[in-house]
Amino acid sequence: MNELYIVTGGNGHLGNTIIRALRDQGKVVRALILKNDSTTLLESLGCEIIKGDIRDEQTLELLLDSKASLTIIHTAGIVSIAQKKNHLLYDVNVNGTKKLVDLATKKQVHRFIYVSSVHAIPEKDNEELIQEIDTFDPNLVVDSYAKSKAIATQYVLDHVKLGLNAIIVHPSGIIGPNDYGKAHMTMMIEEYLNGYLSSRVDGAYDFVDVRDVSLGIISAINHGVVGECYILSGKRIELKEMFLTLKKLAGKRYHIHVLPFWFAKISAPLAEIYYRMRKLPPIYTKYSLYTLRTNSNFSHDKATQKWGYTPRSLEETLRDTVLFLSEMKRIKRKRVLNWIKTYQPIKQ
């Protein structure tokens, strides 16, 4: 039987990277994008495109209309670190997911991969290793985004009992090339290299390359166990290390101030207003500051043992991200552009 891979959120950072990987393997792909989204990128990847809304039942019927064996990779959702409440967040992340899950269960699709988040997993104290769990409760996690992912994840798992061949993946903080939008971490890198970001805070988080997550998802389709969850994390990185690497990539030691954490928390609302005026997503908010001080010691041992999942180095990820941004003409400083093209990483 013919196979059809369906990717929701096809224009997103993760979505378009998954499509690239699938197309490299010769797979037939159909993508869902928003009605007003450009089709240029996905057309260049040789992808069938459906425009619509994940919350619209007619859109979903059209999306899943095929006699082929269907594998759905559900990446569509709203990622928000902003303090201001987004009324669409619950509607898209929870209600949209529920409608897709209901239809996928009815159609008895071959595989359903739900891209959850490590934020759906309750934090542990004292840097204790965080591993996969099998029950999700929104009351045990912090902030609206994490709660929405916990609710949706549990809904997917509940439908496994009803016959849905679903597998859950939990990426950590996704970074890397192919971000044609304005994701939080891509914006931070871009702002720094263009000279707009002159301060940071101390803290750490687990960051993972978008390409490693994409390959991990494809491995989960082939080797994952229905009803199981898999953390797709990278490495816990201190922000100091990240900016030192960016300084090497920039070819010049651009000075950056380290703000006291108390001051950053007080000024976070003003920073959100500043970026809103520039029509850009905020780089740091009250919630993002919170995550930099929480336990992000996520374990990807389960995926590593199951199918050999191995995330790449931070230096490779950042170098390729800067190269991508330069190719997209999103870095203005000529010195950075000239340096990055000839930069050779130190071999480990």
Image (cartoon, rainbow, N blue to C red):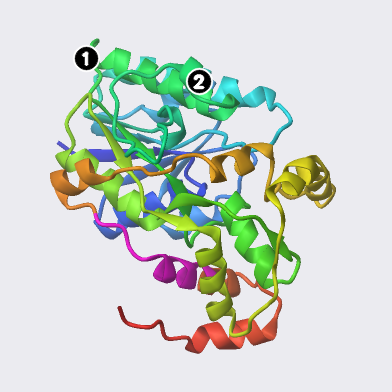
Q: Nearer the viewer, residue 301 or 49?
A: 301
Few, some or many residues within 10 Å of mark 2 (<14, 14–19, 20+): many
Place of residue 81 in the rendered image (x, y in percent of width and height, measured from the top left): 63, 38
x and y percentages locating residue 14 in the rendered image: 45, 48
Tell me what residue is drawn at x 39 percent, y 41 percent: 127
Q: Quarter holding the N terminus?
A: top left
Magenta highlight on residue 318? yes
Which badge, 2 or 1, is on the more N-terminal residue? 2
Residue 137 on image: x %, y %: 42, 16
Q: Which residue is mark 1?
A: 163
- Image quadrant containing the C terminus: bottom left
Residue 32 position within the rendered picture, expressed as x and y whole percent measured from the top left:
47, 37
Crowding at label 1, few (<14), some or many (≥20) Cα neighbours within 10 Å?
A: some
Q: Residue at x 50, y 15 (%)?
A: 139
The alpha-carbon separation of the residues under discs 2 and 1 comes to: 20 Å
Q: Is residue 243 visible?
A: yes
How many numbered marks are there? 2
Describe the element under mark 2 as helix, strand or loop: helix
Res 46 visible? no
Q: Nearer the viewer, residue 145 or 31?
A: 145
Amino acid type, mark 1: Gly
Occupied quadrant, residue 188: bottom right
- The residue lying toward the viewer, choosing from 108 and 263, is 263
Picture quadrant where residue 211 is located: bottom left
Magenta region: 310-322
Residue 216 sits above or below residue 25 on the image? above
The furthest residue to the front: 126
Secondary-structure class at tag 1 = loop
